Amino acid sequence: MSTTETFIAHLIELRSRLMNVVIALLVVFVCLFPWASDLYALLAQPMLAKLPQGGQMIATDVTTPFFVPLKVTLMTAFLIALPYVLFQGWSFVAPGLYAHEKKLVLPLIVASTLLFFCGMAFAYFVVFPVVFGFIVAAAPEGVAVMTDIDKYLSFVLGMFVAFGLAFQVPVVVVVLVRMGMVSVAKLREIRSYVIVGAFVAGAIFTPPDVVSQFMLAIPLWLLYEAGIVVSSWWVAPPPPAE
């Protein structure tokens, strides 16, 4: 088979796998659509639980009450279908990988996905109650906290992404060590700089309060240490130079 025919065959396979992904997302989305309002209510629960009795959110745009639950449903459908999406991606690239690469890539994909979900869960169950409680408590007397549902969704998605990416630190550390770009000894040596960087990241990607900054910085640091531990026993040391 010529190079051109091989390239076209890869494009056809890629199109087929992308179509499978789109179909899977649509099927899950359609199944979840009747519960769109319930899914948004679940997402809004950490904020609603901290509002004074009778407190509620508001919608400042005519179409917002329809489109915001729709966005939440689409996001949920993507998360549910994510294992299948990753399977399609893995099936596409796996034939071009060597055996030792497959042994490395597949565990990293699985670990990265689980850690991203863990980061989202940590944000939802631990960070949100603390942050929203602080925001409501800090409101001046006479000010009613009534967040717009679209802005709330944007905030929540931003926090999910921030904590999901933060929980990827062990994977990044392992990959860097495995590729020989940095040694475990060097990672231990720069620990103090990483801690400072974690607090800077916490200040940038979280609301402007010390509590939420610590709630991102401390996990970042601990995950970095976890990456060092995993790298120490899982990644084989390089052979001695001759």
Image: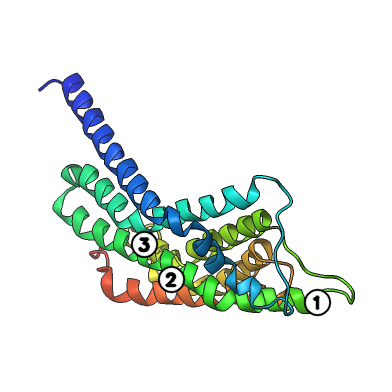
Disc on res. 3: none
> What whole-number distance in Å separates the C-alpha atoms at marks 2 and 3?
9 Å
Q: Which residue is mark 2?
A: 118
Q: Residue 195: where, in percent of width, then height? A: 58, 73
Single out the mark in the foreground, 1 or 2: 1
* Among the 4 quarters of the image, the one containing residue 192: bottom right
The residue at which mark 1 appears reads as 138
Q: Secondary structure at mark 1?
A: helix
**Residue lying at 65% horizontally and 73% vertically, measured from the top left:** 48
Residue 149 vertical position relative to residue 202 in the rendered view, above or below: above
Dot 2: element: helix
N-terminal of the pair, mark 3 or mark 1, is 3
Instruction: Give the residue at x 58% y 48%.
Output: 67
Q: How many marks?
A: 3
Tag 2 and tag 3, C-beta contact below 8 Å: no
Relative image position of residue 160 (x, y in whole percent): 53, 62
* Quadrant hosting residue 239: bottom left
Residue type beneath disc 1: Ala
Q: Which mark is residue 113?
A: 3
The CA span between labels 3 and 1 is: 36 Å
Q: Within the image, what quadrant is residue 100 found in?
A: bottom left
Q: Rate crowding at label 1 as few (under 14), some (14 to 19) or many (20 or more) other CA atoms within 10 Å.
A: few
Where residue 178 appears, as percent x and y from the top left, is 31, 61
